[in-house]
Image (cartoon, grey):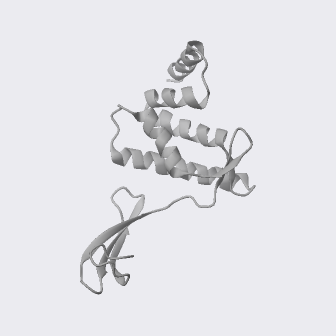
Amino acid sequence: MKCPVCYNEDTKVLDSRVAADGLAIRRRRECSKCNFRFSTYEEVELLDVSVLKRDGNRESYSREKMEKGLRRALEKREFDVEKFKKLVNNIERDIQVFIKNKKEGSVISSEDVGAIVMKNLKKVDKVAYIRFASVYKLFTDAEEFEEEVKKLIRKK
C-alpha cells in the first residue's frame, strides 16, 4: 500500500480490526520513509462471477452497476450510507450463496441477480422495491404496476 504523502510503497500494518459496520477490515498503517500514519479499509468483493444476460451474452459481475440500480431505486428516499453498504453486502453474500449452492461454476443469470436484489430491497424499503421491480420486470402499463403493489400489500 502506497503512502498517500510520499508515495513510498514500503508501509507496515500496525493494527487490523473489523470495521464498525462489520463488513470491512480497517488497517492502521505507517510509512517507513516519512512515518505518516493512515488507515485503509478493505472490503470483500465477488471475484470471477459471470452474469448471463437475457439476450444470451455474458459479462463480468459489476458491483458498480448493481449499486447504480440500487441508487436509482432509492433516489430521494431516507437511506444512509451505512444502510446502503449493508444492503449491497447482503446482496453480494446472497449471490455467493446462490452460486455455491448451484455448483455449476461461477455463472448467475441476470434474472437471478434481479430476484436477489428485489428480495433484499423488499426488506428495507418497499417503495424502492416497487421502483426496482418496475424496471426489472419490464412493466408495460399501470395495471402491472398496480398488481405488484397489491402483492406487496397482501404479504403484509
Q: Position of residue 17 (x, y in %)?
A: 36, 69
Q: Residue at x 67, y 56 (%)?
A: 100
Q: Nearer the viewer, residue 44 or 51?
A: 51
- In the picture, measured across the screen, residue 126 lies left or right of residue 98, that is left
Q: Residue furthest front?
A: 6
Q: Residue at x 48, y 51 (%)?
A: 89
Query: Image quadrant for the N terminus?
Result: bottom left
- In the picture, measured across the screen, residue 5 lies left or right of residue 96, that is left
Q: Residue at x 52, y 59 (%)?
A: 45
Where is 47 relative to 28, above or below?
Answer: above
Q: Residue at x 38, y 81 (%)?
A: 9
Q: Position of residue 101 (x, y in %)?
A: 69, 53
- In the picture, measured across the screen, residue 90 lies left or right of residue 3, that is right
Where is 126 relative to 37, above or below?
Answer: above
Q: Position of residue 51 (x, y in %)?
A: 66, 49
Q: Position of residue 135 (x, y in %)?
A: 56, 29
- In the picture, measured across the screen, residue 58 lies left or right of residue 152, that is right
